Structure formats: C-alpha cells, structure tokens
Image (tube, rainbow, N blue to C red):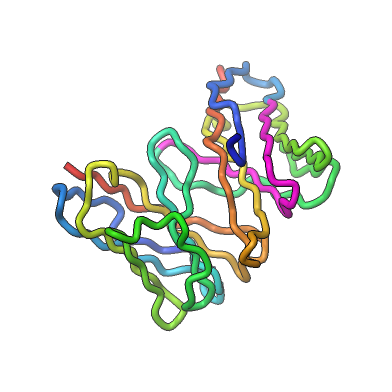
Amino acid sequence: QKEVEQNSGPLSVPEGAIASLNCTYSDRGSQSFFWYRQYSGKSPELIMSIYSNGDKEDGRFTAQLNKASQYVSLLIRDSQPSDSATYLCAVNILSTSGTYKYIFGTGTRLKVLA
Amino acid sequence: EAGVAQSPRYKIIEKRQSVAFWCNPISGHATLYWYQQILGQGPKLLIQFQNNGVVDDSQLPKDRFSAERLKGVDSTLKIQPAKLEDSAVYLCASSRTGAGETQYFGPGTRLLVL
C-alpha cells in the first residue's frame, strides 16, 4: 500500500462547480497535512495546511481532515479555469529516527472547463 | 522575504557526465530538502538537512548522488555519473524548523540526460 494515495485523474469539472479532491494515507502517526497546487512546468505552491480533525476554510478552498478514516480532502468552490493544475497531497510523519518527513502523493490533475 | 533560490533552471547533459545543482533556502530556515520529481509523479525526498547535518538520506542513490550543506545555509546536490533515468526536476525546499510546518519550494532545476 502506498503511503499517500490520490486518484491521478484527470478530474474535470465545469466552471463554477465544486471540485472535490481526495487523499488517503497509511501512517496513523501522521502529524500534519498539506495541499499544494502545481501548474505545469512550475514548482508546488502551498494552498492549505491542516493539523486537526474537521474543516478549515480559506477563501474558495476548504480542507477536511478525518484522522480516524485516514482521509484528507480539498474542496474548491466556484472553480475557475485558472484552478486547472495538479494538486498534491502531502503528509508529515514522525519517523522512527525521530525526524519529521514529508510524503507526497502522485497528485490529482484538475481540469476546469470554461 | 526572498524565496528559495535554485540554479541552474535547466540543464542538458549526456549520460555518464556529472552535474551539480545549487540551492539557497529562505533566510533563517534551518531545514533544507532536495526532492526528485519525475514527470507524472509526486516529489520524492532525496535528502533532508537540519542546519548542516543530514537527518534523512535513505532514498539518495549514494553510489552516484551526493549533497552537502556547508555552514548550514546553501546546499549543492551532485550527480556523478548521470544516467538516463535521472532526467527529472530537482526541487529544493526549506522550512523553518522541520518539525511539521510548511515547506516552501524553489523553482526547480529541469535536468535532461541524453
């Protein structure tokens, strides 16, 4: 089982709709969770971070975390063509050596259709 | 605040040649990461430094890859000799303490090995 799993997509949604991106992780000791957006040919940029169960909202973005189900999601409301990108889920875990490390999923490609 | 700087942005070499990448993290960030991102995949951690010490290099192919972070600031990643499968984007990232907070990425170096 992969440590962080995402559906590679593409996920196609019409402009103005809600895009729902999902991520599951295997390590129950995961500490913190991040969503990055990566445009083609660019480096990842942070969208949201979430550390505790529940929802966290920032503008059109909502991150949802359920540690019991080992599941984190990202909702994008009023999707715009400019949201078309790959969305990477990253999980931060405390390794056996006592250091924190980030594990990335393969990313979900989102296409917002005008 | 200046972001993470990387150079060069692009590099084309032939197999068996050597190449080096440079990274300067955000000022004051103690933790520096080198990732390899192959097309269509998420970033894979190669090496993580805490100040000038290595805390994780478990996925670094040590027979050909080396990295250093002298004086706990900027860092160099070297590949010698390069193989075709090393063609990828090499991303440098930094975070303030490495204890689960956000990491920020540089623009990346795109390497093509012919």
Task: Please tell me whether residue A33 belongs to the stretch shown in magenta.
Answer: yes
Query: Is A76 above or below relative to A96?
Result: above
Query: Is A103 above or below relative to B34?
Result: above
The N terminus of chain A lies in which quarter of the figure?
top right
**Residue at the image point whose x is 27% and y is 48% from the top:** B111
Task: Please tell me whether residue A34 belongs to the stretch shown in magenta.
Answer: yes
Q: Position of residue A79 (x, y in %)?
A: 65, 26
Q: Is residue A30 left or right of residue B25?
A: right
Counting labels gives: 0
Using the rendered image of the protein, determine whether residue B4 is visible from the camera's viewpoint.
Answer: yes
Q: Nearer the viewer, residue B2 or B49?
A: B49
Q: Is residue B21 left or right of residue A60?
A: left
Using the rendered image of the protein, determine whether residue B3 is visible from the camera's viewpoint.
Answer: no
Query: Is B80 above or below relative to B52?
Result: above
Q: Which residues are magenta?
A: A20-40
Q: Position of residue B75 (x, y in %)?
A: 39, 70
Q: Nearer the viewer, residue A78 or A87?
A: A87
Residue A23 found in image quarter: top right
Q: Position of residue B84 (x, y in %)?
A: 23, 42
Our reading of the magenta stretch's main secondary structure is strand
Q: Nearer the viewer, residue B49 or A40?
A: B49
The C terminus of chain A lies in which quarter of the figure?
top right
- Residue ranking furthest to the bottom: B71
**Residue at the image point whose x is 85% and y is 42% from the top:** A54
**Residue at the image point whose x is 76% and y is 38% from the top:** A70
Q: Position of residue B7 (x, y in %)?
A: 31, 61
**Residue at the image point whose x is 60% and y is 49% from the top:** A46
Q: Nearer the viewer, residue A42 or B55?
A: B55
Residue A16 found in image quarter: top right
Q: Is residue A62 left or right of residue B102?
A: right
